[in-house]
Image: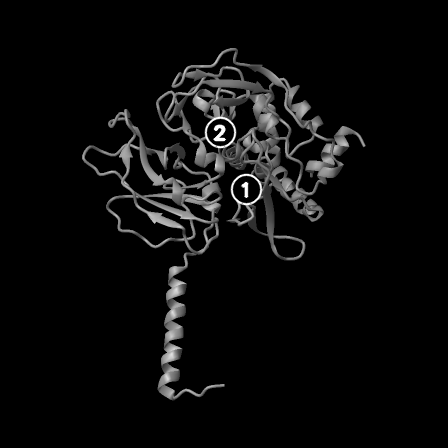
Amino acid sequence: MGSEQNERKQYGQSGRKFNKAGAAFVLLSLLFGLGARAQSAPPRPDFASLYRPAASRLLAETRREGDSLRLLLNQPGAPAGQALPRLRLTVWPAYDAKQPLLQTAPRLRLYPGADPNAPTLVLTAALPAAQLPAGAVLRARLEPPTLTNQPDGPDQNPATTAWLHLTPERLARPFILLDSLGLVLGRPYVRAGEAVVVAGFGLPQPVHWRRYAATGVAALPPFADPRRQPAAPRQLGVLDSSAAPLPPDHLLRLPQPGLYALRVGGAGGEPVRTVPLLVARPDFPGQSTADELIENLLYLTTAAERQQLRQAASPKRAVDQFWLTAAGGDQGRARDLIRRYYGLVTAANELFTGHKPGWLTDRGLVYVVLGPPATVRRLPTGDERWQYAELDASGRELTFTFRPRPSTLAPDNYELVRRPEYESLWYAAVERWRKTPTVR
């Protein structure tokens, strides 16, 4: 089968007796007991709202400091005289656990050395590390000082809520990454030319780096059998590396695109720890050039179609014409399709980028073509289960399962559990983008 046919097939084109009083007492006791337990059990969290496009997101990171785990987060500055928001921290043994391990409301403080008048503040609080078992999850939630504590709900507000998986590496890592403004770098990428600072606790540690070629391999369609695909290389080739260690707290500029492994430690017996960081193009996570706009059409087009778009006299106009055709000639509808499709690509890059841009990952693939899921559950196994309102072939709500497959250079990597029955649904979703008589 030729490459054109293969791509078309992959992505799709088109005993004791009690007296009455005793029995009544037992019945009332059972009813009240069950009611109390039902009230104390929090609703099962739904993480779907964390995956919807949002104007702002709470960015939080951690750093080990002796017997404490310090939480640092970015927060827009408040008007002069206004109190800082309240912080509620809850530690759970798993994402869907019924009872927390720890609940606390520590006082937020300004990060030492931070400008209190800056438009964005770095706030910090500490937790006792001994009460944080590896594998637990931490939820940080900000509450305005004017509000009283509200009962937990299933939805998560991305502007005020952040979840952190307390892996052994996170619990032990004695440094965080800050940007050139001194703000917490709560994302696994920077743009070419941006600077970062490795801000450590304790004995200053040297910093080395290695640069690898960032993989641009797109995720396979949900119905593809990975066993029938060409084997991917097990190791990435090193393009270059730092010749000498960088001083601690030094501004580190990484001008060349690629996947970097920052290696921190080695002094005073401290182990060397690796943090991956993707250096992307200057307009990431969005897109501005015709080549980028065409590349992002991968899931909707064939290689021949994309080549035709690139070879057009005006590639940008050719992209516009692609969407105008998809909209049946309606310019307003075409603009809406462009805004929504590339908005999903940008959101996928913000949410799922790791060792490669987010739209190329398994979660990004489903996100771009089908949109944000209606419901997201995180299971004790570490799996994420996405549910859509659409029905599958058996009449049930469409569900995708993503399993964690972490590695040193991709600690947050998830792989989709692919199934042959997704094929017809996938083709139908692609066709809805390509031929849209009415707004989706």
Label 2, on which residue? 188
Question: In front: 211, or 75?
Answer: 211
In this rendering, the answer to whether 173 lies above or below 280 is below
Please give the label number shown on residue 371. 1
Residue 316 makes an appearance in the image: no
Lateral position of residue 181 relative to residue 315, left or right:
left
How packed is label 2: few (under 14 Cα within 10 Å), some, or many (20 or more)?
Answer: many
- What residue is drawn where x is 55% and y is 45%? 382
Question: In front: 27, or 429?
Answer: 27
In this rendering, the answer to whether 334 lies above or below 101 is above
Q: Earlier in the sequence, mark 1 or mark 2?
A: 2
> Which amino acid does the dot numbered 2 rest on?
Pro
Element carrying mark 1:
loop
Residue 161 position within the rendered picture, expressed as x and y whole percent measured from the top left: 39, 42
Quadrant housing the C terminus: top right
> Which amino acid does the dot numbered 1 rest on?
Gly
Specify how the rendered protein is coloured: one colour
Please give the label number shown on residue 304. none
